[in-house]
Image (tube, rainbow, N blue to C red):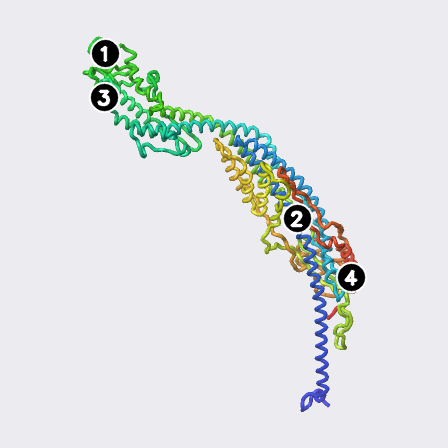
């Protein structure tokens, strides 16, 4: 009988062949079912390990939120204190707000002191919680594993954070801040005094300009230069402009108005009658108008935002003042000699002038021997009287022009007095603001940062201690009995939660209104400023301007000298040089990663050993117990701090002058309050028992 005849013949398959085929098929079927059973059991413990790894990193994520909130509080208080100093310097530049400036500087000092106290308490509280993170992670992992136990048996999980120890938590210090406080404290009184003197000079200039404006056109329709020019010379339109505000007006306006006015008066001058007296007075008026045109031609007004100079001629009001002008010395009057004494006439057309021998001046008339003209009666008094009336009463053009010329002189003197005072005040303010900006530039050195246990991630070992459905698939075609202890390793780390739109500090100020009674004055300014400064944590230096504007909004910056607005603009401009990068304020979330990635990121001796044993385990699965043993040894060396409270107070943020206290707390995982410490110890004992007794040597293939 051949081999073929046993399993097949000419008619097809034999009975023996069918039996063998059936046995092979049944063997494959039950073996596949057993493989499915093993894989399902492994998948279950892997899922538990993954869930435990994610849960173990949750306390680290919550801790980092607390760190960032504490850092936001420290940074915002630092910036608020520094900016309060700067806003105080700005307020000192406005004398009416000098007292408010002193209050802001005092508030800045108190804010920085409160920051120091909070920072110290926060660092201590965070340090304590950081030391508890290994236990909190282990408690979370153990609790999650235990809650997944069912009919298949119990689960135990141990979590190990990498790195196992965190760096010390502390805030820095700023030498520039100390220098700022000392400089502002020593220089604030001197700055306030300089600003006050500059303000007085500026007010004097302001008052002089207001007087000039009123006499030129501000008093319209009452008597003023504009109204007199229109009435007496018929000026209108561009030759006689009307301004509605002193802000758009300058002393060049009345100068141009006077030039046009005297030109038109000269061209239009006519005697009131044909009498010699009226004709003589008309001739003397023409002489005065020509004199005025000449004087005004040499006049000038130069004005910029930072300087003023002007030369407006003053016209004589009487004979005495006339003697001090060119009217007194110019040889413009005809002299005739027909008798023993010469005669000086008011003008060439005098009936008694006849043939003119020469021309003389009024000075010549008064210094020599002259006979008075019987027709025109010319004398020094006659010429001096030309403008006496129009400069003495308010219906004369010269009356208002003289007041304007006096106002221009006063304005120029006030500017001359003000310039050095302005420079002194600006230099003093600039020096102090520079110190504030230096302190703001070093604000980044006074921060709270942490590199806690678990910063690189967490490695978790999960154990399934049940029998794994021992009666399933019992047959002669596959092994029978319980699967025994199963184990799985998982790892997690923290990543930025891109799905979150809110910041970790977004609700830090929620409910502040209910914390105490409404605040006003400097306290309100401080609270508004702090709220704005919290934006700096996300926006960087751009957000500081918002905090500054919140403080400056309560300061009346308007002043005659303009020092307040200048100081505010200077301070705002300086903020652009403050190099403060925005911080990442998004929450962190645990994600699953490979244990190799966590071990390499965590570094240290344990991570190196783990990676070596991991490679060995992958090459020779029978040696996996070495990896488990290493983890057990490491966990047994961790000093867990048992926490009995569900919430740990880190520190309290006190906002000076605002009456606000904001507690900063960390809510611990529920597992802590539910006695997860026992689960951690139990999980460790289970792992130590398994690795010590070699129960992991059985392999399913």
Relative to 62, residue 319 above or below = above
Q: Residues within 10 Å of mark 3 (few under 14, many from 20)?
A: few
Q: Give the secondary structure at mark 1.
A: loop
* Circle 1 residue: 342
**Name of the residue lying farthest toward the right:** 693
Alpha carbons under labels 1 and 4: distance apart: 143 Å
Q: Give the secondary structure at mark 4.
A: helix
Pointers 1 and 4 in contact (C-beta within 8 Å): no
Question: Which is nearer the N-term, disc 1 or disc 3?
Answer: 3
Measuring from the top left, give residue 366's x and y in whole percent: 29, 12
* Circle 2 residue: 66
* Circle 4 residue: 691
Alpha carbons under labels 2 and 4: distance apart: 38 Å
Q: Residues within 10 Å of mark 2 (few under 14, many from 20)?
A: many
Alpha carbons under labels 1 and 3: distance apart: 28 Å
* Circle 3 residue: 273
Pointers 4 and 3 in contact (C-beta within 8 Å): no
Numbered tag placed on residue 24 in the rendering: none
Tell me if I can see residue 179 in this picture. no
Q: Quadrant of residue 247?
A: top left
Alpha carbons under labels 2 and 1: distance apart: 108 Å
Image quadrant occupied by the N terminus: bottom right
């Amino acid at each position: 009988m051949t081999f073929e005849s046993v399993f097949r013949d000419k008619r097809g398959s034999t009975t023996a062949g069918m039996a063998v085929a059936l046995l092979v098929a049944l063997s494959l079927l039950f073996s596949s079912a057993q493989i499915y059973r093993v894989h399902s059991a492994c998948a279950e413990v892997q899922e538990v390990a993954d869930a435990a790894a994610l849960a173990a990193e949750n306390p680290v994520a919550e801790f980092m939120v607390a760190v960032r909130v504490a850092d936001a509080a420290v940074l915002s208080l630092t910036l608020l204190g520094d900016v309060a100093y700067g806003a105080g310097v700005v307020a000192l530049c406005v004398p009416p707000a000098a007292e408010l400036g002193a209050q802001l500087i005092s508030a800045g000092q108190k804010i920085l002191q409160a920051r120091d106290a909070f920072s110290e308490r926060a660092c201590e509280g965070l340090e304590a919680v950081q030391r508890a993170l290994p236990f909190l992670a282990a408690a979370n992992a153990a609790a999650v594993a235990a809650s997944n136990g069912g009919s298949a048996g119990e689960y135990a999980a141990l979590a190990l954070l990498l790195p196992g120890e965190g760096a010390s938590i502390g805030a820095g210090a700023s030498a520039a801040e100390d220098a700022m406080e000392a400089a502002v404290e020593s220089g604030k009184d001197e700055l306030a005094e300089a600003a006050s003197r500059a303000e007085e000079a500026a007010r004097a200039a302001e008052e002089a300009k207001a007087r000039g404006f009123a006499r030129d056109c501000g008093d319209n329709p009452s008597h003023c230069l504009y109204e007199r020019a229109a009435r007496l010379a018929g000026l209108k339109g561009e030759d006689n402009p009307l301004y509605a505000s002193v802000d758009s007006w300058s002393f060049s306006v009345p100068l141009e108005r006077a030039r046009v006015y005297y030109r038109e008066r000269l061209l239009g001058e006519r005697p009131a009658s044909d009498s010699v007296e009226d004709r003589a007075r008309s001739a003397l008026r023409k002489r005065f108008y020509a004199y005025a045109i000449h004087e005004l031609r040499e006049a000038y007004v130069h004005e910029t935002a930072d300087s003023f100079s002007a030369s407006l001629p003053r016209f004589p009001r009487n004979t005495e003042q006339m003697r001090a002008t060119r009217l007194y010395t110019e040889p413009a009057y005809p002299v005739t000699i027909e008798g023993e004494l010469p005669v000086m006439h008011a003008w060439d057309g005098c009936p008694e002038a006849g043939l003119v021998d020469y021309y003389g001046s009024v000075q010549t008339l008064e210094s020599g021997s002259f006979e008075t003209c019987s027709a025109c009666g010319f004398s020094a008094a006659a010429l001096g009287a030309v403008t006496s009336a129009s400069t003495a009463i308010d219906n004369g053009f010269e009356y208002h022009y003289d007041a304007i010329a006096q106002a221009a002189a006063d304005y120029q003197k006030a500017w001359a007095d003000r310039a050095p005072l302005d420079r002194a005040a600006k230099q003093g303010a600039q020096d102090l603001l520079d110190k504030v900006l230096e302190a703001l530039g070093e604000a980044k050195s006074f921060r709270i940062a942490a590199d806690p246990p678990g910063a690189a991630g967490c490695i978790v070992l999960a154990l399934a201690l049940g029998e794994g459905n021992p009666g399933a698939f019992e047959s002669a075609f596959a092994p029978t009995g319980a699967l025994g202890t199963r184990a799985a390793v998982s790892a997690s780390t923290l990543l930025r939660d891109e799905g979150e739109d809110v910041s970790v500090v977004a609700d830090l100020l929620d409910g502040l209104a209910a914390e105490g009674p409404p605040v006003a004055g400097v306290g309100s300014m401080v609270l508004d400023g702090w709220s704005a400064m919290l934006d700096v944590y996300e926006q960087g230096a751009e957000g500081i301007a918002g905090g500054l504007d919140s403080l400056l909004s309560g300061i009346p910056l308007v002043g005659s000298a303009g020092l307040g607005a200048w100081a505010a603009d200077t301070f705002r401009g300086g903020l652009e040089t403050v190099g403060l990068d925005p911080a990442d304020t998004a929450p962190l979330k645990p994600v699953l990663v490979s244990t190799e990635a966590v071990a390499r990121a965590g570094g240290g001796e344990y991570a190196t050993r783990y990676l070596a044993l991991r490679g060995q385990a992958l090459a020779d699965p029978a040696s996996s117990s070495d990896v488990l043993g290493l983890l057990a040894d490491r966990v047994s060396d961790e000093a867990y701090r048992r926490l009995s409270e569900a919430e740990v107070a880190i520190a309290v943020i006190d906002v000076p002058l605002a009456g606000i206290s904001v507690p900063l707390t960390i809510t611990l995982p529920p597992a802590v309050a539910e006695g997860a410490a026992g689960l951690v110890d139990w999980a460790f004992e289970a792992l130590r028992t398994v690795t010590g007794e070699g129960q992991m040597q059985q392999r399913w293939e």
